[in-house]
């Protein structure tokens, strides 16, 4: 159940957003992809999860290629992502947001629904209970019935996390889960990510906050100008001369 | 709605022909019922998947013509012709859904408008099949065994049953994981895909059911007015359906029915109240006021009112 990215390249017109990157995400780990703005992190995410067709390269999960699959088909194989910009179902309640996330756990087809089969009621109750448990897990039990777009920013990001978890990922890709959060909220998210891994879910993370990345990652992959310039455990990355140059020298990016 | 209100509403609907003896009023209620089926149908797309079909009159018209042609030219009995009308419109909904697979918003609207335009032209120009602008007179009324349903009272109950069936279909879909997939498409399509909702599959499904229900409405109309002409494809019908859904409350189950009742009765009431010069003006002003003061529609506004009182 390894995610393997081989020579992945994405061109936007003449601009190479990704110039042939390769890395692996081993099962049961937390792997972070870091790099200055515009280094291709989100582009890599979009290519892996089917939102973007790569120009070149191979993406395999558990030995099977993900190339050309729609995002929903990739989710069905256990690879689920969140988005960099807050992304919830805005006019629905927190509980209903998570219920949509449980789509793949439901089995009701159109014929059964139209005939009003009795077992559907049982399935709905089971899904509602699962949704409740996930809402509690991310600490939003008191917000269950509230409309998602009315929540403060940090809590909306937690809703997103619950929605993604509801899809029962085996590999969860988180695109800047800590962005725009307060220090306390970031600590909560870090703890949650560890809990998630504890449940046997592999995590691939894009994140700017170095303290968060170095604190929770098993492996860190550093992207710069669309290429991998370093890969290894956090301690080795922090001491890597090329990484230091990329962050402090070339762009002066916040770290 | 409380249980008591529901029971009362059902009782009123079931006994209506006994206290509403005036055939003209009964006619208005029957038309409201037919538009109720059409509005429920449009609401499935507009209210739940968030896609606006401005070609809904096409499904209505195809349903009406299918019923009329099968009973007149091939001498089919009415019931199988109705079923065929629903099946054929559902099929055309599938085709539109497939065509519009990757199109959303304005582009989806354009496909549906063009489809309605094409179908309308066919109905006018394919003289051998449709009798062109002259239309098809003498569409038979349905019969239950030896009893003809040509009286208004009998037809009222047929339409009532159709409204109940359409409502049931919509309610069951909407309150299931399928309905949640519709909402997910309306609310946030990329997010829906990311958790495994195959949104195009559900858009096609919504289009098929929606078109099929509109076809049922068209068939009911054909066997009621007993005459079908290319007028059934008029854009006005689509606009009326949109007004009913939006004014009643899109994305609610009761909204389209409330809208259908109100906006079938309103023009008739205005006809009684004012001279013809003022009718459309008054209709327009009332519609504007309604949209201005109740932007989300009547049913959501009523719910909000009750929620406030409860808290």
Image (cartoon, helix red, strand yellow):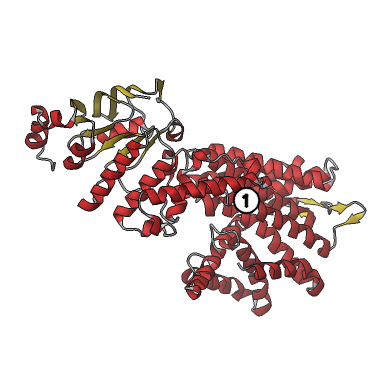
Residue A147 in picture, x, y percent from top left: 42, 58
Q: Secondary structure at mark 1?
A: helix
* Of residues A36 and B121, the one drawn nearer to the viewer in this rendering: A36
**Occupied quadrant, residue B34:** bottom right
**Occupied quadrant, residue A203:** top left
* Of residues B279 and B53, the one drawn nearer to the viewer in this rendering: B53
Q: How many marks overall?
A: 1
Question: Is residue B180 shown left or right of residue A17?
Answer: right
Q: Is residue A129 visible?
A: yes
For the point 49% across and 64% down, which residue is it? B296
* Of residues A168 and A152, the one drawn nearer to the viewer in this rendering: A168
* Of residues B229 and B102, the one drawn nearer to the viewer in this rendering: B102
Q: Quadrant of the C terminus of chain A?
A: top left
Residue A206 in picture, x, y percent from top left: 26, 37
Mark 1, Cα crowd under 10 Å, few <14 / some 14-19 / many 20+, is some
Residue B224 in picture, x, y percent from top left: 78, 57
- Report which residue position mark 1 lands on: B172
For the point 62% across and 54% down, which residue is it? B171
- Specify the subunit that label 1 lies on: B
On screen, B271 above or below B300? below
Residue lying farthest to the bottom in this orientation? B273
């Amino acid at each position: 159940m390894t995610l393997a990215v081989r020579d992945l390249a994405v061109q936007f017109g003449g601009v190479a957003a990704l110039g042939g990157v390769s890395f692996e995400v081993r099962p049961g780990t937390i792997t972070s992809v870091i790099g200055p703005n515009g280094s291709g992190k989100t582009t890599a995410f979009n290519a892996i999860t089917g939102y973007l067709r790569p120009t070149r390269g191979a993406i395999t999960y558990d030995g099977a290629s993900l190339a050309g699959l729609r995002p929903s088909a990739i989710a069905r194989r256990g690879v689920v992502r969140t988005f960099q910009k807050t992304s919830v179902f805005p006019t629905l309640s927190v509980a209903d947001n998570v219920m949509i996330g449980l789509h793949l756990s439901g089995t009701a087809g159109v014929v059964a629904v139209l005939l009003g089969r009795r077992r559907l009621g049982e399935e709905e109750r089971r899904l509602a209970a699962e949704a409740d448990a996930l809402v509690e897990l991310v600490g939003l039990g008191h917000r269950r019935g509230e409309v998602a777009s009315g929540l403060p920013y940090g809590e909306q990001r937690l809703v997103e996390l619950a929605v993604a978890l509801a899809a029962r990922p085996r590999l969860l890709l988180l695109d800047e889960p800590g962005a725009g959060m307060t220090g306390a909220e970031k600590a909560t998210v870090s703890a949650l990510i560890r809990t998630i891994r504890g449940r046997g879910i592999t995590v691939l993370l894009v994140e700017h906050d170095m303290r968060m990345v170095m604190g929770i990652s098993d492996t860190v992959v550093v992207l710069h100008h669309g290429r991998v310039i370093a890969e290894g455990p956090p301690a080795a990355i922090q001491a890597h001369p090329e990484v230091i140059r990329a962050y402090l020298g070339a762009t002066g990016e916040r770290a | 709605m409380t249980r008591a209100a529901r029971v009362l509403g059902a009782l009123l609907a079931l006994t209506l022909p006994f206290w509403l003896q005036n055939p003209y009023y009964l006619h208005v209620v029957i038309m409201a019922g037919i538009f109720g089926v059409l509005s429920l149908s449009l609401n499935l797309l507009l209210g739940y998947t968030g896609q606006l079909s401005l070609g809904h009159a096409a499904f209505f018209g195809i349903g009406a013509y299918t019923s009329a042609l099968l009973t007149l030219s091939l001498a089919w009995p009415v019931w199988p012709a109705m079923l065929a009308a629903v099946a054929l419109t559902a099929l055309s909904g599938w085709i539109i859904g497939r065509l519009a697979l990757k199109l959303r918003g304005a582009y989806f609207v354009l496909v549906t408008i063009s489809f309605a335009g094409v179908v309308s032209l066919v109905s006018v120009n394919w003289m051998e099949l449709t009798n062109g602008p002259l239309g098809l007179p003498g569409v038979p009324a349905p019969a239950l065994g030896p009893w003809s349903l040509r009286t208004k009272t009998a037809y009222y109950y047929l339409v009532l049953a159709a409204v109940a069936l359409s409502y049931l279909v919509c309610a069951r879909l909407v309150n299931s994981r399928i309905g949640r997939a519709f909402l997910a498409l309306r609310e946030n399509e990329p997010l829906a895909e990311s958790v495994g909702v195959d949104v195009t599959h559900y858009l096609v499904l919504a289009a098929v059911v929606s078109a099929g229900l509109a076809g049922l409405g068209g068939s009911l109309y054909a066997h009621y007015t007993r005459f079908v002409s290319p007028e059934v494809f008029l854009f006005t019908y689509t606009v009326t359906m949109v007004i009913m859904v939006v004014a009643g409350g899109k994305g609610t189950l009761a909204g389209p029915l409330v809208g259908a009742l109100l906006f079938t009765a309103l023009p008739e009431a205005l006809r009684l109240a004012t001279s013809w010069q003022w009718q459309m003006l008054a209709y327009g002003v009332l519609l504007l006021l309604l949209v201005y003061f109740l932007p989300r529609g009547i049913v959501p506004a009523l719910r909000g009112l009750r929620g406030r009182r409860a808290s």
